[in-house]
Amino acid sequence: MHEMTKQNLETAFAGESQAHMKYRIFADMAQREGKKNIARLFAAVSYAEQVHAQNHLRALGKLGKTGENLQSALAGETFEISEMYPVYHAVAEMQGEKEAQKAAHYALEAEKIHAAMYKSAGEAAAAGKDIELQEVGICPVCGYTVEGEVPEFCPVCGAKGTTFKTF
């Protein structure tokens, strides 16, 4: 692939991914405000942006089989843990940006758990197996992730366990 095309696809993937998430969040907000049709509109367009992002990822050759996708996911989480979020947190701290510090801390703590889960799943996939996975709980405030029983309170941010979203 030519470098300019690759860069364009990567930029487009990032933009479509951000639009997907932003519109999904907007849909949730509209739903909470009782504007169900606006919420539905945001959700529909969010899905379209996800389709665009998937097409760009495929064109980049970065959409593989499950084992490859797990390796890619683990590499991303590892980068976030070892480099990205520690630096983001340090800069936010240096600049006195409390909300940014909190956001980086919350993400870092969740990414550590995600990396461990992806590592385990990758080992199973490499052996040609699926994983045993209990219900997964996600804290809606900080993203803390737990497999199995949800704690009474989130160990990272203190949110009530009853607010966790389960998968």
Image: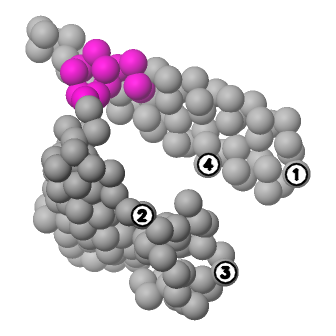
- Labelled pair 1, 4 in contact (Cβ < 8 Å): no
Residue 73, position in %: x, y?
25, 48
State the SS at label 4. Answer: helix
Distance between mark 1 and mark 3 Cα atoms: 23 Å
Residue shown at 69% from the left, 35% from the top: 42
* Marks 2, 4: nearer the viewer: 2
Q: Residues in magenta?
A: 53-64
* Marks 4, 3: nearer the viewer: 3
Q: Amino acid at mark 2?
A: Leu
Q: Amino acid at mark 4?
A: Ile
**Figure check: 124 above or below 44:** below
Residue under circle 2? Answer: 133
For residue 162, which numbered disc appears in the image?
3
Quick one: label 4 or label 3, which is nearer the N terminus? Answer: 4
Look at the image and say whether residue 23 sits in the magenta stretch.
Answer: no
Residue under circle 4? Answer: 25
Quick one: label 1 or label 3, which is nearer the N terminus? Answer: 1
Residue under circle 1? Answer: 34
At label 4, counting other C-alpha atoms closer than 10 Å, the crowd grade (few under 14, some 14-19, many 20 or more) is: some
| Front-lying residue, 148 or 145 | 148
- Labelled pair 4, 3 in contact (Cβ < 8 Å): no
* Marks 1, 2: nearer the viewer: 2
Determine whether, in the image, residue 152 is placed left or right of residue 106.
right
State the SS at label 1. Answer: loop
Residue shown at 19% from the left, 17% from the top: 6
Determine whether, in the image, residue 54 is placed left or right of residue 124.
right
Distance between mark 1 and mark 2 Cα atoms: 35 Å
